[in-house]
Image (cartoon, rainbow, N blue to C red):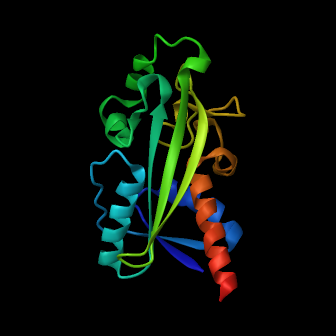
Amino acid sequence: MEIFFATNNMNKVREAEAVLRDFGIKVVPVNVKKIEIQHDSLEEIAKYAARIAYTELGKPVVVEDSGLFIDSLNGFPGPYSSYVYKTIGLRGVLKLLEDYREIELRRARFVAVVALALSESDIKVFRGVAEGFIAFEIRGCKGFGYDPIFIPMGSTKTFAEMDVEEKGLYSHRGKAFRELGEWLHRMQQRR
């Protein structure tokens, strides 16, 4: 089985592949126009982007959107994580948290939403959450985005200190794609 994934981010493709191969699903990245609306809901952003990708591709397609939510910053940057990363970067986020010197005050979560558009009106949504903390410094050289400052609950490593398979055990994206894989597997068994 193949699934089209509307993304140019090969890091996301590798993470999806690492999870979906367990379900016998091959991930095929496709370069289609992906429009991300401004919205407070990752689900609405992903659903809208999936609908547009389906319209352009004419086939079932997956879109993923994610955000980093930091408790002490009232959930900031949330759905605006990509923009914040591009503008102030990791050092800027660490600067915002410099007065929070205890790890418990640096609680955060990564949330990923995978939207599968089966048609323009039939869109399934799968959500994954990774609870954790923001590190005190940038650590690791693997991964991408906020990975060098995010320590998932149950680990002492940042995502950037883990290989793809280990990250997949904790990852918000891994959890969302695992939900998608389980759903597709159930649908296949019903045929």
Percent across and percent down for residue 91 are 41, 23
Q: Nearer the viewer, residue 1 or 45?
A: 45
Percent across and percent down for residue 84 are 34, 34
Percent across and percent down for residue 190 are 67, 85
Percent across and percent down for residue 75 are 43, 32
Identified at 52% across, 26% down, the residue is 138
Identified at 55% across, 18% down, the residue is 105
Identified at 60% across, 80% down, the residue is 1
Q: How many marks?
A: 0
Can the viewer see residue 25 in this picture? yes
Q: Nearer the viewer, residue 75 or 172?
A: 75
Residue 7 vs 185, above or below: the answer is: above
Residue 161 vs 184, above or below: the answer is: above
Can the viewer see residue 145 in this picture? no
Quarter of the image with the C terminus in it: bottom right
Question: Is 22 positioned to the left or the right of 138 in the image?
Answer: right
In the displayed image of the protein, which residue is found farthest to the bottom?
Answer: 191
Identified at 47% across, 22% down, the residue is 72
